[in-house]
Image (cartoon, rainbow, N blue to C red):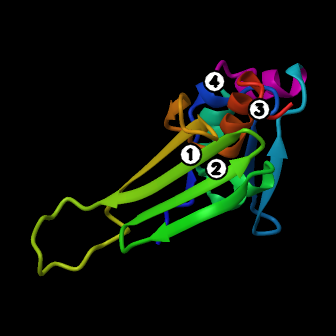
Amino acid sequence: MNKLYYNPLIEEFYIGFAYETYNSELHTWENKVIKDSEHLCYLLFNSNNTTWLEECKDVVRVKYLDKEDIESLGFSIETESSETKEFFYNFGKEDYTLEYFNWFVNGSTEPNIPFDYSTATEYRKVKIKNKEGQFTVFNGTIKNKSELKILLKRLGINE
């Protein structure tokens, strides 16, 4: 149902970025994290003057941010609702609330055509507010766990 992975853009790669590569010998996906600048340079440049990502784009993927990723960063689920094409999670941690919306839009507006998740456009939105809901510290799109970790660190929430 969900489109769980996407092919990253070269701009997304930085030290600490998590991604997966396909091991064709073992027929499995392997978790990777860019550890240092040497690793990052290897991924971005090679002797053919093309990037590693350009050459390997079909075997590199990143998992979209999901409920489990948010929980793994210390947030606990407070409320959850799920309708046919829309998911909403409300997480709490310390003095903050994180709202995660995930919904799908199909191109067809015909009521008799069944909803097809494989052709639907998926949207993901994150809103972080103080517990009292008086102010929003972030309202936007976060594609993956690595991006959320950086945002939380910049906001001083996850240090």
Q: Give the residue type that dot 1 points to.
A: Asn
In this view, 111 is above or below 2: below
Q: Give the residue type that dot 4 points to.
A: Thr
Viewer-proximal residue among 150 and 47: 150
- Give the Cα distance between marks 2 and 1: 5 Å
- Give the Cα distance between marks 2 and 3: 27 Å
* Horizontal side of residue 14 vs 1, given as left or right: right
Q: Nearer the viewer, mark 1 or mark 3?
A: 3
Q: Is residue 49 magenta?
A: yes
Q: Give the residue type that dot 2 points to.
A: Arg
The residue to which callout 3 is attached is 157
Q: Nearer the viewer, mark 2 or mark 3?
A: 3
Q: Is residue 24 magenta?
A: no
In this view, 64 is above or below 82: above
Tell me the SS state at disc 2. Answer: strand
In this view, 36 is above or below 17: above
Where's residue 113, x and y in %?
A: 16, 78
Q: Is the residue under label 1 in contact with that under label 2 (CB below 8 Å)?
A: yes
Segment tinted magenta in the rendering: 38-50
* Horizontal side of residue 67 vs 135, given as left or right: right
Q: Nearer the viewer, mark 1 or mark 4?
A: 1
The residue to which callout 4 is attached is 50
The residue to which callout 2 is attached is 61
- Give the Cα distance between marks 1 and 3: 28 Å
